[in-house]
Amino acid sequence: MSGMTKPKIEHPSLPRNAVGLTRRTYEGGMSTLCAGCGHDSVTAAIVQACFELSLPPHSVAKLSGIGCSSKTTAYFVSGAHGFNGVHGRMPAIAAGASAANRRLKYIGVSGDGDSLSIGLGQLGHAIRRNMDMLYMLENNGVYGLTKGQFSASADFGSRSKKGEPNLHEPIDPVLLALALGATFVARSFSGDKEQLVPLIKAGLSHRGFALLDVLSPCVTFNDHEGSTKSYAYVREHQQTPIATDFVEARREITVSYAEGESLPVELHDGSRVVLRKLDRDYDPSDRAKALAYVQERALRNEHVTGLIYLGEGRTNFHERHQTPEEPLNSLPFSKLSPGSETLGQILRRYR
Amino acid sequence: MPELKQSPPGVNDFVVKFANVNGTGSASANSLIMKTVFRMGVPVVGKNFFPSNIQGLPTWYEIRVTGEGWIARSGRVDVMVAMNAETYARDIAELSPGGYLIFDSTWPRTALLSRDDVTVLGVPLAQLCTENFDGARARVLMRNIMYAGVLAALLDLDLEVMRALLTESYARKPALVDANMKAIGLGYDYARRQFQCPLPMHVAPLDRTQGHFVMDGNTAAALGCLYAGATVGAWYPITPSTSLMDAFRGFCGRFRVDPETGRHNYMIIQAEDELAAIGAVIGASWNGARAFTPTSGPGISLMNEFLGLAYYAEVPAVIFDVQRVGPSTGMPTRTQQCDLLSCAYASHGDTRHVLLFPANPEECFYMAVQAFDLAERLQTPVFVLLDLDIGMNDWMVPDLKWDDGFEPDRGKVLTEEMLEKTGRFHRYLDVDGDAIPWRTIPGVGEKGAYFTRGSGHNQYGAYTEDSAEYQQVVDRLLRKFRNAAKMVPSAVIEGDGRSSTAVVSLGSCDGAVREALAVLGSRGLRLDYMRVRGFPFGEDVEDFLASHETIFIVEQNRDAQLRSLLTLETAVDKRKLRSILHYSGFPMSSDCIVDAVHSALARGEAA
């Protein structure tokens, strides 16, 4: 069986974005995931976000590791280069790719096994480097392709499909990212497109590392009673202290918010995220409070969703390395290789 | 004045060895002496035998003064400067008969008087330091530089050359030049007063170092990376490869910072481990930058999975493996050639990789440049296999040449303009029949977009689990690998081809092999010699193996890895192959080769 391709038929009446493309342009190959998989909803949200942001498809690079989630980079923006690397090591490929060309928009898609078990170290260091990328963690608490083992994000005591309890504490990527100094930390739910799309757009516009943990139920191995990552459980226990709207730089703000309720934050590209507080006490610019809040809610079995932390102040990967605006992969050879006369001067020091 | 015993004459032909304590500044004194000999026009070989330690453990440095220009160790020690009480016993034991032992006579050392076939020269170095310098640290450092003065007198080293070298080293701290010269003067004067100077073995100026410089292979390889136009270096620090990235960083600081903007036309990523380092190299190469990683054996082990991905997905990568003693952590500061097989077949599944084998820093420079061209031409990882001896020791190197008309070979990359003129782009289609497909760099445009994956893919780049489609791609990869035999550096073959007996070797064995062949030749035994410089092996290697009856394979590992590789990858009859193995961790000298060849021939194993 070869990879399945979707016919690209565009009806003339389909709406077009600022670069004249329809939503269909941002789709990819046919998904081979199970019917009803949360990951497919995430893919649809990425398609929608890229369409709404009017990204030229070739300005995007899609990176992933191994697993169900990592397959999804083949299912959106077929006009972008994609790289399905090795298990848990997508951040390393992203670091090198970003080093070579700082102009592309990097979308990394990973899962809870890829990011929190085999790739935990790489995720941590990607956060530290504050690489300019959107890192989506499609989180279902289970290993699907190997048929139902618990992942590191499975909650303590939650039950597998066969009824076995999970014996170990979970690793929460949101708490991890907050602790490691991530500059953009969000969580959403694959079934909540209204929340997910603006978060993806904000993450793509953020200058630095944007972690977006998406609870994305596995319909085959983790959607039963006793699971804390099932559709029913997440719907019931999702807790959103803050709602996020994304306003692009070129669009006028048409929605008005009552004073005291909204908190617009300008991103480096001129776009804005407008946060509406649903919980009065929540402050998404205070890392310590965000950490405490997520932890408190977790004790009440609540999944906090929304833009949990945003800090635009820190320098990113390329600023720290003082690289030029022109991507390293485009610098002319004459700027890189110093020539024979200089070689002679260098060797003189070694006589 | 102690009486000097008779010693074999050895003007411009002797070995001085220094036994020091790590972290006491001895490296400066030793390299000063080596450089002085070099600047006096006399060819010189420097070898550092250091511990995996920052301060306190024993360390040795060996300088071979060789007017003839040999490049290996000689196996002798004619002058031992014994500065480490802890190792006196073995240091005096190592001294060749007729040699000289120099020690700090501030304290009585009766143990040093155990041999009557060597001459012991005591210099009260510590006492002289205490009398002439203030501060504990200065006294330790000056004690080492002072023996350079003692040797200057005994070996007839040029004090003005020493002063010039110090002046260059301490250009920013001129006070240090005077302090160092004061110490050198104290040692020099003491030796002149107390001993008959110079010794029979000493340095007499020549003009045989013109057109040469002194550099280690890691620095030369880093220089190659600079000249090749590498912009991304990713690494995890590991001995003995660390100085390669340090040197690259240094060169970039001087030649890659935009003078107007101050921006860096390079990026060095210190990764969290070797897995991430090679991952970043693959990401950067995939994205069109020239990228490399320096590492050593343990790093190669960790990189295996990623190397298979780069092989199968056809992503260029340049890996410098500065080999050290394994297995496991092994002896990190000792040299071996023990990663040949682990590099040749790195990663699970059917994988074979292109390897380059430099023998000296000169080849490190040229092969570094070539490695980037080959990696991009062949779209595959290319390994440059140095070892600690080449990488970290100072070698006398003929001046490097650079052709200003050099254009890097970026391989088969479709630009936006080319894509517009062509039909549909398929990443793994062999359109030219050379087993190398075209690739595109991300960002080039939607027509060039493709999906890179380590999972099964067909020639169009699509995911596949179809047997025929899978085999079509891996069969082409095999053809591509075979074609690489014509692209890697050819073997260096010497001899008149009339001998039925030959030596085959690689890398840093070269110096010892050449010297051994000269010794054997002087005894009437003429052997042909082939040094392989690349893998896969070309027809030149096949022909050489086919045309000799007895072939000694000289290499630095226990398991005869080069012999294995030749057996696996050429048609040679393995019964013709005799291994000469050296795996002590120290650079080899010619004597073990001479002895092995002699004893094999005595047993009637060769004509």
Image: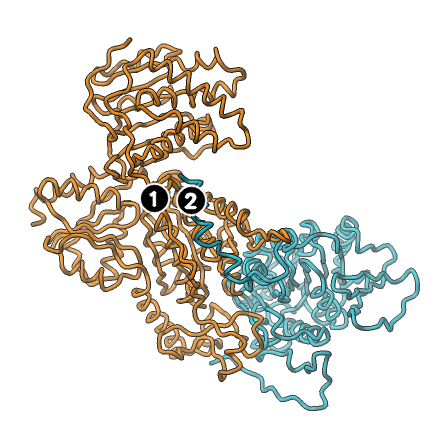
Q: Which residue is mark 2?
A: A347
Question: Split into 4 quadrants, where in the image is the N terminus of chain B?
Answer: top left
Asked whether B514 or B597 is in front, the reply is B514
The secondary element bearing badge 2 is classed as: helix
The orange one among the chains is: B
Q: Colour of chain A?
A: cyan
Residue projecting furthest to the top = B1
Chain ID, mark 2: A
Q: Amino acid at mark 1?
A: Gly
Which three-letter amino acid code belongs to the residue tagged 2?
Answer: Leu
In the image, taking residue B606 as reference, residue B468 lies left or right, namely right
Q: Residues within 10 Å of mark 1 (few under 14, many from 20)?
A: few
Q: Residue furthest right?
A: A259
On the image, the x and y values in percent for residue B296 come to: 41, 47
Q: Are marks 2 and 1 in contact (CB under 8 Å)?
A: no
Residue A233 falls in image quadrant: bottom right
Q: How far, Cα to Cα, is label 2 from label 1?
A: 10 Å
Residue A125 x/y as whole percent: 60, 52
Task: Name the residue beneath numbered marker 1.
Answer: B211
The chain that hosts pointer 1 is B
Furthest residue in direction bottom, as rendered: A12
**How many neighbours does mark 2 have within 10 angstroms: few (below 14), some (14-19), or many (20 or more)?**
some
Q: How is the image coloured?
A: by chain
Return the residue nearer the eye: B405 or A332. Answer: B405
Can residue B192 be spotted in the picture? yes
Residue A70, quarter of picture: bottom right
